Amino acid sequence: MTVRTAPTGTESTLAELLPLSDARGWHRAACRGDPNHEAWFPYPSEDFAYARTICASCPIRAACADFAAETGQSGVWGGHEFDRGRMVRE
């Protein structure tokens, strides 16, 4: 699977951080296009209720969390917070 991100040096949107693959259903992500970028990358002491609420109804929630674990992502993926692919908060 190929993962595409925005070029280095530009601010990425959450949609650009997701893999662009119709086969995995990423185009259906509930967070796609969400303008609240900071909510998806909380500091460890911050609440991530906003992101969890969006993830709760997402049809690809499990695949999103699996992707984060498999590829070493940080931030909120699939309703869980990850740090370099390791789940740190549910």
Image: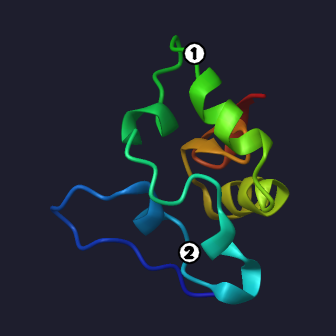
Tell me the distance, in whole angstroms, between the alpha carbons under discs 1 and 2. 26 Å
**Residue 65, x across and y down, in percent:** 75, 53
Q: Which residue is tagged 2? A: 19
In the current view of this chain or complex, which residue is farthest to the left? 9
**Residue 34, x across and y down, in percent:** 46, 49
Q: Residue at x 78, y 54 (%)?
A: 61
**Rendered image coloring scheme:** rainbow
Label 2 neighbour load within 10 Å: few <14, some 14-19, many 20+:
some
Q: Secondary structure at mark 2?
A: loop
Task: Locate the N terminus and report the quarter of the image it occupies.
Answer: bottom right
Q: Nearer the viewer, residue 47 or 59?
A: 59
Q: Residue at x 55, y 87 (%)?
A: 2
- State yes or no: discs 1 and 2 in contact (Cβ < 8 Å): no
Q: Secondary structure at mark 1?
A: loop
Decide if residue 59 is on the left or right side of residue 69: right
Q: Which residue is tagged 1? A: 47
**Residue 14, x across and y down, in percent:** 44, 56
Q: Earlier in the sequence, mark 1 or mark 2?
A: 2
Residue 26 vertical placement versus 51 (above, below): below
Res. 8 mark: none
Q: Which amino acid lies under the numbered mark 2 shown in the image of this protein?
A: Pro
